[in-house]
Amino acid sequence: MELKTCKFESISKVNFDTIIDVRSPTEYNEDHIPNSINLPVLSDFEREVVGKMYTQQSQFEAKKIGAKYISENISKHLDGLLSNKNNNWKALIYCWRGGQRSKSLGIVLHEIGWDINILEGGYKSYRKNVVKNLYEDELFQNIFIISGYTGTGKTLMLDQLSKLGAQVIDLEKLANHKGSIFGSQPNGQPSQKKFEGRIHHLLKNFNNQLPIFIESESSKIGYLKIPPALWKKMKHSPHFELTSENDLRAKFLSTQYPELYNDTNKLLNKIDLLKEFHRSEIINSWRNLIEKRDFFTLAKGLIEIHYDPKYKNSTNYRETSKIQEIHLDPNIKKNVAEIANLILENANKIL
């Protein structure tokens, strides 16, 4: 019996136990189908060796050494992650185009007796689907924006909505960046492709009849761009605006960046990045507050001089699309929980 194939569009209709990406680790780390595991049939080094031999020496010799590498790697996988799979295990395998790399593993696993499918067109078909959905199509999901000035607890609100079972796209979490000049996180940001894949996966699996909540953002989070179809939808979506007094916001912000407050040199370097926006006297006053470890006053100064004017000049949400302005204290968990319930209830009423 020949290997079965499967189109990317039909993956959600088929229940696979495992999705296997057989590309090299570098290819996989740049981007991959969400929830897939990496079982490379060629390492980065082996792929380079085979590729050079194929183009510069002999296609026959390249195929021969490629088969040697692939056989050794498949043997390792059978001794490793595949060793405990029972006879009812079902897997989808893909490589770059759905060619020799995926088929090489697929044939062996199929001959063992497992139910194996090869993804038609490989990773390229998946990526083509992502690009079509996020660059070319118009999104029709029911998106609601959580807007508000910096320090009003927008990310906290998303987290609380998620705990209530609501559908949430936390773009900053997906981008591994808090969205400001102070927002870089350990391990850096994912690739643009991986960021888009994460968004696409959520949209594809959400119930389109229910609300989806997203925090207001600029068009870029760190160096990653919000894909155009989503960005367009966000700009025209209704929003709930959170408000809070400056002192409450400053208190909240002074607890939100422990990695910076514990490393004053790092925080001083971040402040220096604001030199192009503010006079030297202001920068020096903020530096002095850091030296004194007066993070509350620093946060309040940043709110009043940097964040709020910047937000007013760059807001992307029309006043006419505002559903409700809601006051809260982001420092009080009970208050955040109450507001989250209110937002979810009102969004569902609108639908």
Image (cartoon, rainbow, N blue to C red):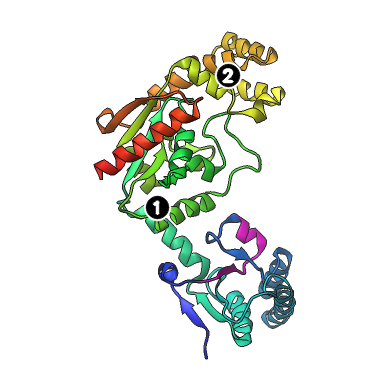
Whether residues under marks 2 and 1 lie with C-beta atoms below 8 angstroms apart, the answer is no
Residue positioned 57% across, 80% down in the render:
88
Which marked residue is nearer to the observer: mark 2 or mark 1? 1
Q: Position of residue 250 (x, y in %)?
A: 52, 19
Q: What residue sits 58% from the left and 75% below the top?
A: 102
User: Label 1 is placed on what type of residue?
Assistant: Leu
Identity of the residue furthest to the bottom in this view: 1
* Callout 2 secondary element: loop
Kindly identify which residue carries mark 1. Answer: 134
Task: Please give the range of residues in magenta.
Answer: 16-29
Give me the residue at 56% from left, 49% from top.
Answer: 191
Question: How far across and how far down the image is residue 339, in percent?
Answer: 39, 31
Would you say residue 259 sits in the magenta stretch? no
Rendered view: 293 above or below 135: above
Regarding residue 237, the answer to whether it shows in the image is: no
In the image, residue 25 lies in the stretch drawn in magenta: yes
Query: Residue 156 location in percent, x, y?
Result: 49, 34
Mark sitting earlier along the chain (2/1): 1
Disc number placed over residue 275 in the picture, else none: 2
